[in-house]
Amino acid sequence: MSRFYRDSPDFWELEVIHEIPLYRPFVEKWAQVESFQARPDDLLISTYPKSGTTWISEIVDMIYNNGDEEKCKRDAIFNRVPFMEMSCPGLLSGTEQLDTVPSHRTHLPVQLLPVSFWEQDCKMIYLARNAKDVAVSYYHFYQMAKMHPDPGTWDEFLGKFMAGKVAYGSWYDHVKGWWEKKKAYRILYMFYEDMKKDPKREIEKVLQFLGKDLKEEVVNKILHHTSFQEMKKNPTANYEMMPTWAMDHSVSPFMRKGMSGDWKNYFTVAQNEIFDAHYKEQMKGSTFKCQMEI
Ligand code: A3P
């Protein structure tokens, strides 16, 4: 059992989140999240942080709006596809926004998902990204997104990531938990690395999963609008609409590099060896496979 989830589905038990003062409002609104009533046609996007949540959310919003870029610029991505467990004083909480939108996103580990999503057999898209790139991206995010404590040095942060002592807990448990659940539920399990390799094929997978048929020219528009270069300069997608007290892009932009294999620029040979051995141990017995680079 991970540190993140001990013995009851109660957010107060999430000691990792609990240790982070600015996540406290998340905890206080947990009852609303837990009792959230999903509708059968709700779509849930689930990810471990820094796995491409914003990317897949933008793709889904473009699909729902039949490739109309202007409609997708109606608001910031965090309002168009709200975070279910999000809570920040002075702002609408995730659950308050959810009633008005068809798709939601979450970083919750599978065992904490509100039960109504399973009861309603909602469609869900899970997007995974390799652990090494997630750790690097998360390290930069911790520095720019002010709800997090100081991540310390890269080496210190990597240790915390491996131990699951970061917000949302263990990457290993997260990807494995959702991987197992897909056997019994309508979960499209995707990989960031596949999206980098062949984004059009992956967009088509999402279309098929959602039962949507769009013309080739519309698919190409979605492909263009959701490329890293386009999203990086789009204020409704790049989080520049977040107040700077919450996210400081001068420390590290939210749309940082958007590549696979950047971990090679950060991991020392020794760190890589320790990480690989720990990874093997953590993922033992799971059929989950993910490419560390493309
Ligand atoms: P990097 O920090 O490695 O650049 P999330 O949305 O889950 O927080 O994930 C953020 C990561 O996804 C960042 O990774 C960001 O650059 C990357 N990303 C966002 N949009 C992307 C896109 N269109 N193509 C590739 N990567 C993208």
Image (cartoon, helix red, strand yellow):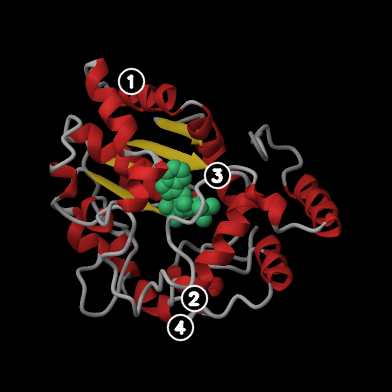
* Residue drawn at the location 79% of the way across and 45% of the way down: 280
CA gap between label 3 and label 1 equals 26 Å
**Amino acid type at mark 4:** Pro
Say which residue label 2 marks.
148
The reply to whether callout 3 and callout 1 are in contact (CB within 8 Å) is no
CA gap between label 1 and label 4 equals 41 Å
Q: Earlier in the sequence, mark 2 or mark 4?
A: 4
Which of 31/199 is in front?
A: 199
**Amino acid type at mark 3:** Met
Say which residue label 3 marks.
259
In the picture, measured across the screen, residue 189 lies left or right of residue 170, that is: left
**Amino acid type at mark 2:** His
Disc sitting over residue 21 in the figure: 4
In the picture, measured across the screen, residue 31 lies left or right of residue 276, that is: left
Say which residue label 1 marks.
208
CA gap between label 2 and label 4 equals 8 Å
